Image: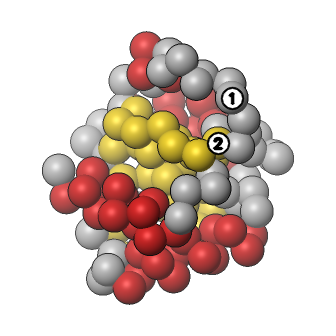
Amino acid sequence: MKVLIVESNFDLCQIWRRHLTRLDITARCAHTQAEAVAAIRDGAFDAIVLDLVLTDGSAFAVADYASYRLPEARVIFVTNTTFFSDGSIFNHMPNACAFIESQTPPEDLAAIVEHYAAT
């Protein structure tokens, strides 16, 4: 399985990547919209872990591009805000499969990713 993690916080991205690697999942980090789009353009991913609030760029633009380039890839949105806490993210992004808090324990995030990437 291959997973793209799009997270502005470098340290958090590395923590999540290490937990995914422990499950034999190949994970790549991107920290900006431009890096994420380049990764999606150049590779195939089974799932994308995408921070809803990127420091540089738009998570919606990344998810939309992924929907076009990798229609089978599932997007797991993470956030540290209450924005979209009503579940409406699923109305806006057809490839969204989960919406979780950034503070979710890394091992739980890895299990969620493993589940959706295998689907």
Q: The disc labelled 1 sits on which kind of residue?
A: Thr
| The quadrant where residue 115 appears | bottom left
Residue 69: image tag: none
Q: In the image, residue 103 lies at what x, y percent?
A: 63, 56
Scheme of colours in the image: secondary structure
Q: Measure the C-alpha gap from mark 1 to mark 2.
A: 8 Å
Task: Count the marks.
Answer: 2
Where's residue 33, x and y in %? 68, 46
Drawn side of residue 69 relative to residue 86, left or right: left
Rendered view: 118 above or below 23: above
Verify CB contact (< 8 Å) between mark 1 and mark 2.
Answer: no
The picture places residue 18, in percent across and down from the top left corner, at 51, 82
User: Which label number is shown at residue 79?
Assistant: 2
Q: Assign a secondary structure to mark 2.
A: strand
- From this view, report whether residue 37 is shown above or below residue 29: above
- In the image, 53: left or right of 36? right
**Figure quadrant of residue 97:** top left
Q: Is residue 24 above or below residue 54?
A: below
Residue 36 at x, y = what percent? 59, 53
User: Residue at position x 34%, y 64% from top?
Assistant: 111
**Quarter of the N terminus within the rendering:** bottom left
Question: Could you tell me which residue is drawn at 52 percent across and 75 percent down?
Answer: 17
Asked whether residue 27 appears in the rendered view, the answer is no
Tell which residue pokes out farthest to the left in this image.
Answer: 119
Q: Secondary structure at mark 1?
A: loop
Tell me, for residue 82, which label it has, or none: 1
**Along the line of sight, which residue is nearer the eye, 106 or 113?**
106
Nearer to us in this view, 66 or 119: 119
**Nearest the camera: 108 or 49?**
108
Q: Count residues near mark 1 (Cα–Cα under 10 Å), then give few for <14, some for 14-19, many for 20+.
A: few
